[in-house]
Amino acid sequence: FGMGMGLGSCRIILDDDSHFEDFNMRQIIGEKLPLWANLGIAQVEDLVLKKQLAKVERMVEKLKADGLIVHVNPMQEWFQPEGDLLSIPPLETIKGLLDQANFPLIVKEVGQGLGPESLRELLRLPLQAIEFGAFGGTNFAKVELLRNDRTRQALFEPLSRVGEDALTMLNHINQMVSEEEPICKELIISGGVKTFLDGYYLIKKSTLSSVYGMASTFLNYAREDYSLLRDYVQSQVSGLEMAEAYLTIRE
């Protein structure tokens, strides 16, 4: 279907190749489609502090990836029983990585989205793209919270409902772009995108070049027979083509 892929966290293959083939997707999707490696901000912070970013460069090169996605997930890490707490503001870590990296970089959240202050600062950086990971899709903070005891779940559950949805984030960005020329000019709009119509509306509303991402609905079909998944993906592609042909959005 001509779709690229962003890998899950590649932390496990930074120092050990035992699971490398689980991530070795280039040979499957071919040379032309986008393929992006992935690390969490906590791992990047640790590598920056230890001056070990060469490990990331080797990993990206070995995967034949187009670049690295860094997922910024402080709330998920906080709720995770064995999570890593950050000692440096993520923005400083990202800037440190940009100063040294010889590959493109995408920054994303994982279910809470990014607030306007964070978005404004990220737009000023030479990133390949910002991915939303907005509130309204899979909430990884809540997933991790469910692994805690009931007392902790009850205490912190309200925090798992804090976040910015995709449309709110997009409105923030459109306003910022009207006020200041961004350095980062591409978006991946994800988090709560359920159908091609959601995706079409959001990318057409964006003043920056954008694509959209969907996860949970694809995975629902991926659990079934491949023919069902194939038919579902084709229906999404056809629906998007129809929307492109016949629909315009209201401002």
Image (cartoon, rainbow, N blue to C red):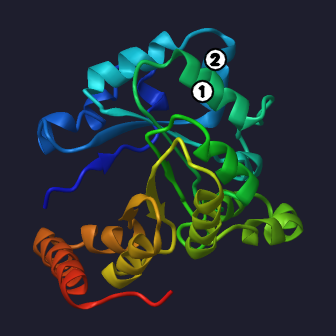
Residue at 59% in and 46% down: 123
Q: Is residue 15 visible?
A: no
Residue at 46% in and 14% down: 55
Residue at 75% in and 53% down: 117
Image position of 39 (left or right of 34): right
182 or 239: which is nearer to us? 182
Q: CA distance from mark 1 to mark 2?
A: 6 Å
**For the residue carrying disc 2, how many other residues have a C-alpha within 10 Å: few (<14), some (14-19), or many (20+)?**
some
x, y percent for residue 161: 74, 72
x, y percent for residue 159: 81, 66
Q: Is residue 69 visible?
A: yes
Q: Quadrant of residue 213?
A: bottom left
Residue at 25% in and 27% down: 64
Q: Contact, CB < 8 Å: mark 1 with mark 2?
A: yes
121 or 232: which is nearer to us? 121
x, y percent for residue 60: 35, 24
The numbered mark at residue 13 is none
Q: Secondary structure at mark 2?
A: helix
Count of residue discs: 2
Image position of 135 (left or right of 200): right
132 or 29: which is nearer to us? 132
> What kind of residue is marked 1?
Val
222 or 163: which is nearer to us? 163
> What kind of residue is marked 2?
Val
Identify the residue position indicated by label 1 in the image: 44
Where 171 falls versus 83 (above or below)?
A: below
Image position of 113 (left or right of 220): right
Identify the residue position indicated by label 2 in the image: 48
Q: Secondary structure at mark 1?
A: helix
- Quadrant the N terminus occupies: bottom left
